Image: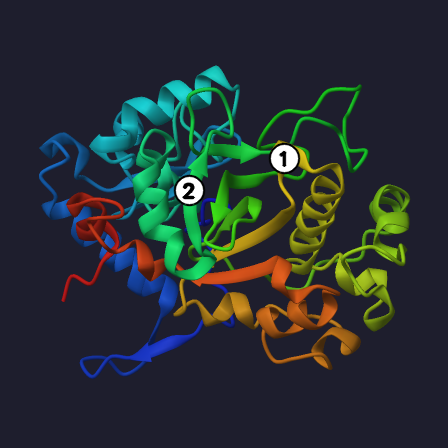
Amino acid sequence: MSAENPSTEPWHTPAVWCPEMTRRITYTETERRRAAAWKATTPTLPEAARPPARYVNKDGRGRGPEYEFCLPVEYASLSLLPEVRELALELFAELDIPWHAGVASGPSNHLLSSQVQCVNALGQMVNDPDRLVRAFGPSLGTARIHEIEPGRSLTFEYIGADDLLNEAVGGVRRRGTQCTSFDAAFVHTTVDGLRELVLIEWKYTESYSRRKAEPDRDEVRFKRYGELISAEDGPIDASLAPFDELVQEPLYQLMRQQLLAHELEKQQAHGAERVRVVHVLPAANEAYQASLYGQKVRGLGATVKEVWSRLLRLPDRFVQLDSAIFLDPQITSVDYVDRYGDRS
């Protein structure tokens, strides 16, 4: 997940036809307009938080024009909805989790931040396992929730207890940065009686372009992940695509996360008999699904989901869910539905 850069528009972002205009409106533009409309009307914001603002990038500086879908920096924390705000800020501080393009010690001021959307959707589930059952039961067969950390049914930016992918710099890893992390995680028992660790990756408006060649960095990546990728008992059939295509995003992130999930399953982390990656993505974000680069990869399928299912030796270890399931106040809240739902 990441905060969208407001100054760039993915060239391949899908679009819907707007009769009032002479061009098509992209999915990202639709979400920007939705966010701006929410900002202008929601009772959860004070009037001082409604003016347009510059996007604060990863360097902590606001640059470029002002946007209706960005909050003034002094109100950035209000991007977190009231029901999750205090809990999320305290939890991220306690676990030393950085906010992506965060302002001060809080979240991004960009209303299309996928990290913020993830926390807004799942934050109440930290202390409310019934919401987890309602959200994931229909697709994952969730029957019972177990604590994943003391006093928590769900946690954020999960990396596991051990450095299973040899990613620690100086022997230290930090959740949510410079190592393979999952946006959220929980442990459940399924209706079939199987104890399972569920690892969640959350996407919103993300899409990816072809990367530039990075031979030096790819050498480091191959030393770190190459043996795990090529292992006969590994999760990925590396014979189907070369390494230089697997390190193209978004496959590179999916690859690292699936490797970590596989190692955690071998370790039986949290007593889990199975570890599954759950990829949450809006069905309308076709640009993400079209982010495929390389001849071999493109020969495996027309979407990221199709390609990734082909590359996995055990396709059931990966599940994709439409984030629309969270537009239910019994799972999230009325404010969440107002923020991210259809405003037409």
Q: Which mark is residue 271?
A: 1
Q: Residue at x 77, y 78 (%)?
A: 295
Provide residue 108's location: percent of width, then percent of height. Answer: 39, 35
Q: Is residue 45 above or below residue 344?
A: above
Cβ atoms under marks 2 and 1 closer than 8 Å: no
Against 108, residue 309 (above or below) is below
Judge left or right: residue 302 versus residue 224.
left
Q: Which residue is mark 2?
A: 144
| Callout 1 amino acid | Gly
Taking the image as shown, residue 300 lies to the left or right of residue 5, namely right
Q: How many marks?
A: 2
Q: Dot 2: what SS?
A: strand
Q: Position of residue 218 (x, y in %)?
A: 84, 49
Above or below: residue 29 compared with residue 277 = below
Q: The residue tagged with tag 1: helix, strand or loop?
A: helix
Residue in the picture at 20% in, 63% down: 342
Q: Is residue 266 above or below residue 324?
A: above
Q: Would you say 182 lies left or right of 265 here? A: left
> Which amino acid type is marked by label 2?
Arg
Place of residue 238 in the rendered image (x, y in percent of width and height, measured from the top left): 84, 64
Camera-side residue: 114 or 184? 184
